[in-house]
Image (tube, rainbow, N blue to C red):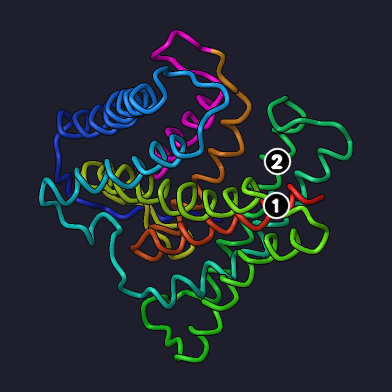
Amino acid sequence: MAIEVHNEEASTSGADKAAAVLEVIFVRFVIYGLLALWLVQLMCGTPTPNPFPIEAAYTVGALWFVVPFVLIYGLRRNAQEYGLSTQSSRQSIDLALSAFPYMILAENAVMMLLITIGWSYLEPQGALVLTASFTLALLLIVRMVSRKYSSFHDIQIPDNKHSSNVLVILLLLCLPIGLGIVPGKLSLLLVSTVVWQFVISGFGEEVFFRGYIQSRLNAAFGRPYEWKGIRFGAGLFMTAALFGITHMLNTANIWLGDFNLAWWWGTFTFVGGLLLGLLREKTGSVLAPATLHGLEAVGEGLALLF
């Protein structure tokens, strides 16, 4: 459990660090927030449509990709330094699949248990149970990564293994949809949930948080710490905090004066953000955390059936 500290020469000043923090906060809560409101108003004639049209949801969800792409490619920043790289993609996908069983047990299995006993993840008891299960999953996954993927970039994934990994992902994503056909429960909501969770929630949020935000903070604060072969810095914790706050805001709209935050939602999502951030640091890419995050679609889809 020991964390090593590496001596790094300070490459940025205190003012540069403050500028990086202010930049990512401004981008997340001002630029993204106001763009989302404007798009919903433009498409629906009101910023608070009820019900919320699916096309508006996907349009707003696309901002998770658009905003960081503009800031990275538009400002000619090094995309690879921001985790937007296909380098070691085979290893990243293999790692995500190896971590998946831990996450589906920590999240979906525990969530089903909470539903059975009548506890909500928005309330203290349920949130703390999920936080504990996420913490256990983090420890087990990091332990697995340190043993199985210690020399991550040197691991050779043959063509047949990579093809089978991709096929497994596709089959997992199709599982809820296929099961929905049999009892006649297939619906637009089910298909949309799987697509949304994998593409928007999984890849979109990871490009934004672990790609743009964490990398921007890493550039300012460095990565002087090492735990089980994973180098990281203060950016890991700040990004996880912003990730948790974002989920707390799911029940609020600060720009419209609604401050009804889901405080407890931020607990286990903070730990989840730490896990996804550690995978981004280990692999140098957002692909592994995006794939693992996106595979939440399997559990979310199955939850609609049972």
What residue does disc 1 label? 106
Q: Using residue 291 as the reference point, say whether residue 128 is left or right of it.
A: right
The residue segment tinted magenta is 235-259
Image quarter where the N terminus lies is: bottom right
Residue 261 percent coordinates (x, y): 55, 18
- The vertical placement of 279 against 55, above or below, is below
Residue found 88% across the figure and 40% down from its top? 116
* Vertical arrangement, residue 249 with respect to residue 151, above or below: above
Q: On screen, 82 above or below 153?
A: above
Where's residue 28, x and y in %?
33, 31
Q: Are marks 1 and 2 in contact (CB under 8 Å)?
A: yes
Kindly tell me whether residue 300 is visible in this rendering. Answer: no
Nearest to the observer: residue 22 or residue 207 = 207
Q: Position of residue 59 (x, y in %)?
A: 38, 39
Q: Earlier in the sequence, mark 1 or mark 2?
A: 1
Left or right of 249 on screen, residue 37? left
